Amino acid sequence: MKKIGVITSGGDAPGMNAALRAVVRNGIYKGIGIYAFQHGFQGLINKKFSPMQRGSVADIIQRGGTILQTARCEEFKTKEGRTKAAENLKELGISGLVIIGGDGSFRGGELIQKEHGIEVVGVPATIDNDIGGTDFCIGFDTAVNTVIDAVNKIRDTATSHERIFVVEIMGRERGFLALYAGLAAGAESILIPERPTSLKDICDKLEHGFKRGKKHSIIMVAEGVGGDFYTNRDLRKTPAFALSEAISDKLGHETRVIVLGHLQRGGAPSARDRILASRMGASAVDLLCEGKSGLMIGMVHEEMKATPLGEALAQEPQINEEILQLSHILSL
Ligand code: F6P
């Protein structure tokens, strides 16, 4: 393996730059040419690339986002698009590709390997933390910290006005970010798609809290939740607004909503994410240099572990029951 391409793909995540830096620096250390392509898979198709030097990734470990930019690429979902991308890589003599991104990006990587023999290793980077084969994805820890910083500020005004705040959290169809951030922020209730909760249960818990003197309540709602308060899935209302109205109608208590949105995708990566990203990015290059590919690098019980892409993608990461139960007990 003499030349490796690298892209960042899908939704950006804090720590992607740290992973890119490790791919470049470890690749150069091993005498490999590293070619970074802009805008994810689109850059492969449009042949938008830069040969990387050590200096190319200077002063980026602390930066959120991705200096390569990223995108979701419809063209790459076509055979023609993947063929064009593969032809460009082969023309440049690039036989390996590191994909820093989420599950959708890895599915594209699996296809270009199967159809064109490009040797792919995936580096999981998504704040949703919804990828099998790894305990944590790059960006998740930073996003949890971003949420708790925001909730700390919300608590000040919630206490001043004795209000209920409904905080909507990203995570697409999964509740990992809401669950971990909820436990860390000490939320009174955490609503996740994996555990539908009734409005009655939510309101009973709120009343229990107020009876014992709570001055405010924070309810974390993952953006993908359903429930009896959100059956009509009125697209003008997000789950948080639907729940806020339902609680206010039922309890007559002042409620407010905050949708944290893309705030959760930004910010300087935490130390944990920088270390995770550096280990994963460097390990991806090691695997390719050892002639191993069609893999995703993950961290399992603090150790780097390679899993076949198909196997990782087929896994349905489970909610940690202990964390879920603990978050309930500690919020009573
Ligand atoms: O997958 C990461 C994520 O932030 C999800 O949590 C969220 O639902 C989605 O991306 C938002 O996508 P976009 O950035 O395209 O609006």
Image: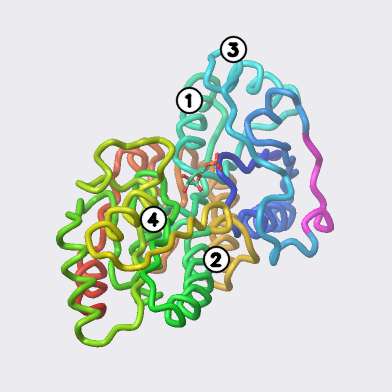
Quarter of the figure that contains the N terminus: top right
Question: Label 4 belongs to which residue?
Answer: 134
Q: In this view, does 158 lie to the left or right of 153?
A: left
Q: Closer to the camera, 214 or 90?
A: 214
As helix, strand or loop, the secondary structure at mark 3 comes to helix
Dot placed on the residue nearer the N-terminal end, 2 or 1: 1
User: Tag 1: residue type?
Assistant: Leu
User: Tag 2: residue type?
Assistant: Asp
Question: Label 1 belongs to which residue?
Answer: 111
In x, y percent, where is residue 101? 54, 44
Dot placed on the residue nearer the N-terminal end, 2 or 4: 4
Which residues lie in the magenta part? 49-57
> Contact, CB < 8 Å: mark 3 with mark 4?
no
Question: Label 2 belongs to which residue?
Answer: 273
As helix, strand or loop, the secondary structure at mark 2 comes to helix
**Residue 299: in sight, yes or no?**
no
Dot placed on the residue nearer the N-terminal end, 1 or 3: 3
Quadrant of the rendered structure where residue 267 is?
A: bottom right
Crowding around mark 1 (Cα neighbors within 10 Å: few <14, some 14 to 19, many 20+) is some
In x, y percent, where is residue 18? 65, 60
Whole-number angstrom distance, CA of label 2 to CA of label 3: 36 Å
Whole-number angstrom distance, CA of label 1 to CA of label 3: 12 Å
Query: Is residue 171 depicted above or below 64 in this figure?
Result: above
Quadrant of the rendered structure where residue 221 is?
A: bottom left
Dot placed on the residue nearer the N-terminal end, 4 or 1: 1
In x, y percent, where is residue 228? 20, 46
Dot placed on the residue nearer the N-terminal end, 2 or 3: 3
